Each structure stands twice: as C-alpha cells, then as structure tokens.
Amino acid sequence: MFILMFIVFVVGYGFIVFEHINHINKAASALFIGAIIWSIYALYGTEILSLGYSSSWIEFSQNTGNPNETKEFITHHELFYHLSEISSILFFLIGAMTIVELIDNYQGFRIITNKIQSSNTTKLLWIISLLTFFMSAILDNLTTTIVMITVLRKLISEKETRWIFAGMVIIAANAGGAWSPIGDVTTIMLWIGNQITSGHIIKSLFLPSIFNVGISTFLLSLLTKGQTIRPILSKSETTEFTTPKERMAMLIIGISALISVPVFKTFTHLPPFLGMLLGLSVLWIITDRYLKRKRYKDHRKYSVTAAIKSIDIPTVLFFLGILSAVAALQSAGHLNIFSKWLDTNINNIYAINIIIGIISAIVDNVPLVAASMGMYKITDANSIGYVANFMQNGHFWSFLAYCAGTGGSILIIGSAAGVAAMGLENINFIWYLKKISWIALIGYLAGAVVYYLQSFIL
C-alpha cells in the first residue's frame, strides 16, 4: 500500500499533465488523488507506518508511548497539521486574488498599462521580466504572478505570445522571491528557522537570481520577435467609468495592502495569510463606506463581494488537491526516503541541492525544504570542513533557498507561481514543457554555477 500511494500520485499527475487530451479539469484530478491517497493512508496506516519511513510517526509514537494509535496519528495529528499549512496558502491566495480583482474592477491597472507604451516584443519582455523580478522580492512570487498576469491580459491579445510572457513571469517571480527573505515560502521557512539571516540571503543570492532571470529572458527574447498587439477592448473597458482619482486611490490602497503582508509577518510573526486577510478587510471597509452614497449598480460592480465572486475558484481547488496529495506522501515517509538516499549516496551539498531543485519542479518545494531542515541540523559557528556548510548562513542553506525557490520554474506545476499562472491563463502543461521548461532549466543551472563560483571567490 505504501507503493500504491506513490502509484496513485504518478497516475493522477499524468491526468493533470495530459488535461488537454483527457479533457478532465486539472482541479478535479488533483482533488481526486489528494482524497484517494489520504484514504489509502488512513485505511492501511498500520501497515504503512510499520515500515518505519515516517520520521514524524516515530517521534509521535515515542512521545505517546503507544505505537498502535495509527488512526489518531493520521487523522488528528498529520491530516490536520498539513491542513493548517494548506489552508494558510489557500486563504492567502483567495485574499490576494480578491484584492487584485478589486483593483482591476476600479481600472487601477490602467495606470500601469498606460505607462508601458512599447509594442516591441523583446523590449516589453525585458520590462515585464525585471518588473516581476523586483516586485516579487517586495511582495512574494505568488501575489506578483497574480498581479502580472492581470497586467499581461491588458497588454497582449495573442494567446501564444501572452503564454510566453506568462512563462517569463513564472521564472522571474520565483527568482525574485529566492533572494528575498520574504519573497518565497521556502526562504521564509529558512529565515524563521534561523538557517539564514535576511542580510546574508540578499547578499548571497541576488547575483545568481539575476543571472537566472537575465539568461532566461535573453533566450525567450529569441523566440518572440516583432510587435505585440494590444487587445481590442470592449466599450465597457474603454469607457472611463472611474475617475483618475478613484483609479489611483484604489491602486495605491490595494498595492499597499499587498506590501503590508511581509511587514505584518515580520512584526507579529503570524502567518502571512492573516496579514493578507487584514489588508483585504481594510480594503473592504474603505470600499463599503465609499459606495454608501453610490447607485445600486455601482455596489454590484465595485464592491469586494463582487470581486470575490469573480476570482478563479478552480485554481484554488487545484492548489488544495495537489498540496494534499504531496502532504500525504510526506507524512507516510516517501519524501523522507528520498532525503536519506541523497544524504547516503551523494555527499556533496551542491549536487544535493541541485537535485532537490529539479525534484521541486515535480513535488512542492515546501515539504522538500521541510524534510531537509529536519534531516540536517544547524551546526556550531566554529565548525570546520564539510560540517561548516550547515552552520547558520552556511552554503547548504543558502544554496537550498536558491535551488528550491527557482527549480520549480522548470515545470509549470512546480511552484505556487506556476500553478497560479496555469489556472489564470489556462496554460497547457505540455506547451510549457516544450516552450519554457528548457529555458527555465538553463537559467536555473546558470544561476547555480554563478553561486558555486561566487562561493569560492567571495
């Protein structure tokens, strides 16, 4: 049954990959495999856990003194533990999507799109790439992707070209999040866990990350020649039904709500989703008071309630399904086996991290980083030799932040940014694999080489 869990994941993953052939929505496939894998785990938990691959089960049974309480462990301990983590991501996503949708309803993004006048594809690609890269470091890769996909819809009409730009947004958002302590979930985990400090991660990963984006953008620019065509807007979209003052106010308030999330996290040490929901609630109060004297028609279009009804719920459910499936594999010990295999057979921190980064394109990077944090402990600052790589700000932890953060770009399903773009733009998995994956891989390896050289030079 332990192997059956993995088989179900692989088969379900295949259904997601070939969505364009089987015509089954990827959210349905993800929810199905998430529920089935947990069901197998619950029904055959005694058999699966007796194999001894689950480190969390070993710790649980030692603490309780009763190794037979498998049902309690799976249902009340592991399932709800992972559900809390998954829910925090989903609430964060819902809050961010609602704020972005509300800004769009007030035509706030017209201020940005009106500033971007270039129709040259190459020039526009570099503008979008760098804008995404630095915005992701300030916000985070998921929120930035949602914002930039919304902007792209107003700049590019042709689907194929917009998908190429969306691919660049995924790469740039993940790379931008890697060098910032608040730009990606994995860097936040390492920062909170004291494996890295904020100043060190910026100093050590900025150069590899910018090389990743620069080379990827250059390669993509070779595929996108000519001029972009802006979408022909409908009468309702061309009509300025909001005043310049309203558009600017909503853009500033909305972006401020998004930017305040990492600040909230830093000061309160509470999960980022609470900061996002706080920002949404403030925006909700402001808009409700503003619409108090407006017509009923304006209430239906400009309220937060209207924005919530417009967000992409299938994308949220896809997140729920795929993260649930990976969480079950982590709980049962599949990822623990992989981690121990790496530690036993590959005794090189650079090779281990590069492999972790590539695997993170298939399996979510959060459990991979969590497994690494559990397997390797922070060593003393006076450590020497190989062990010194595991002290705070050691090369293992810094390189892990880069590899886990950017490796997910290799496949569209490998990162939160990719999954969000896939859902919002309905990007085909196989199309991304053919057009973007090899570029993301080259950029990823180029940044890894830069980090390797930098670690010796500096």
Image (cartoon, rainbow, N blue to C red):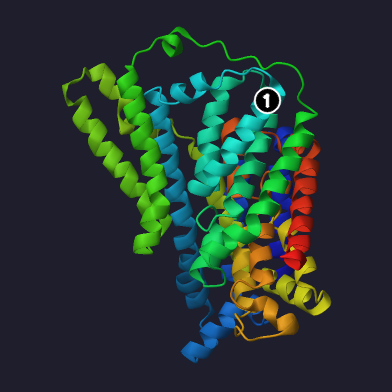
Relative image position of residue 12 (x, y in whole percent):
69, 50
- Say few, some or many: other residues with alpha carbon within 10 Å of mark 1 (under 14 / 14 to 19 / 20 or more): some
* Residue 154 left/right relative to 120: left
Q: Residue furthest front?
A: 458
Outermost right residue: 345
44 or 5: which is nearer to us?
A: 5
Against 67, residue 193 (above or below) is: above
Relative to 294, residue 452 above or below:
below
- Compared across the picture, whether 316 is left or right of 255 comes to right
**Along the line of sight, the residue nearer the viewer: 395 or 159:** 395
Q: Is residue 125 above or below residue 429?
A: above
* Viewer-proximal residue among 239 and 457: 457
Q: Position of residue 35 (x, y in %)?
A: 57, 56
Count all numbered tags in the image, as a single digit: 1
Task: Please give left or right for residue 84 compared with residue 142 in the image.
Answer: left
Seen as rendered, the residue at the extreme bottom is 65
How far from the left and from the top, in percent, is residue 31? 57, 49
Q: Residue at x 65, y 77 (%)?
A: 390
Closer to us: 145 or 195: 195
Residue 181 relative to residue 354: left or right: left
Position of residue 222 relative to residue 238, above or below, is: below
Which quarter of the rendering shows the C terminus? bottom right
Q: Name the residue beneath numbered marker 1.
A: 123
Q: Is residue 18 visible?
A: no
Report the residue that reaches farthest toward the top: 235
Q: Residue 80: tell me if it is visible.
A: yes
Residue type, mark 1 in image: Lys
User: Which quarter of the figure is the N terminus placed in?
Assistant: bottom right
Query: Residue at 17% across / 26% down in the picture?
Result: 292
